[in-house]
Image: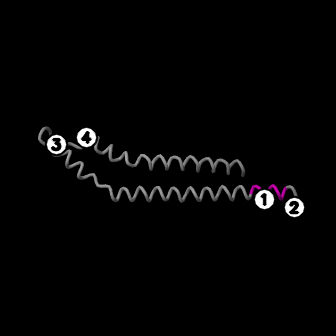
Amino acid sequence: MTPQGKQTQAHSRALRVQIEELDDLHRTREQIVRRAQKRAAADDVRGRILQAATGFERFVEVEPVLFEDVLDEELAKYDRLLSEMDDVEKRQNGILAEIQVRC
């Protein structure tokens, strides 16, 4: 095999590995989305909101702003998933940058 043929073969293998890594990241992203969807389907904050509302209704007019702390706590459950998704995005962007340099 010629030196140019060996170099082409090496580039081809490297690209194949990177494409497989991108496929793995795609699957990881899908798993994170499924976990978020599963959590969202099982998540019901109505009980906490109603409990907080009964404490407020005696003293003030109940408005959505009064429940921001409850909602912030509930949304914090998703922070880890967002962080995982950010990590996947960074890894994906790194691989794509490597592919662009290689091509």
Separation of residues labelled 4 and 3 (CA atoms): 14 Å
Query: Which residue occupies 30% across, 45% down?
Result: 71
Pointer 2 and pointer 1: residues touching (CB < 8 Å)? yes
Q: Position of residue 54 (x, y in %)?
A: 16, 46
Q: Which mark is residue 65?
A: 4
The N terminus lies in quadrant? bottom right
Q: Nearer the viewer, mark 3 or mark 2?
A: 3
Q: Earlier in the sequence, mark 2 or mark 4?
A: 2
> Relative to 35, does residue 89 appear above or below in the rendering?
above
Q: Earlier in the sequence, mark 2 or mark 1?
A: 2
Q: Is residue 81 left or right of residue 61?
A: right
Q: Position of residue 53 (x, y in %)?
A: 18, 45
Task: Name the residue type under label 3.
Answer: Gly
- The residue labelled by disc 2 is 1
Q: Nearer the viewer, mark 1 or mark 4?
A: 1
Question: In which quadrant of the rendered view does residue 36 lie?
Answer: bottom left
Task: Name the residue type under label 1.
Answer: Gln
Separation of residues labelled 2 and 4 (CA atoms): 71 Å
- The residue labelled by disc 3 is 55
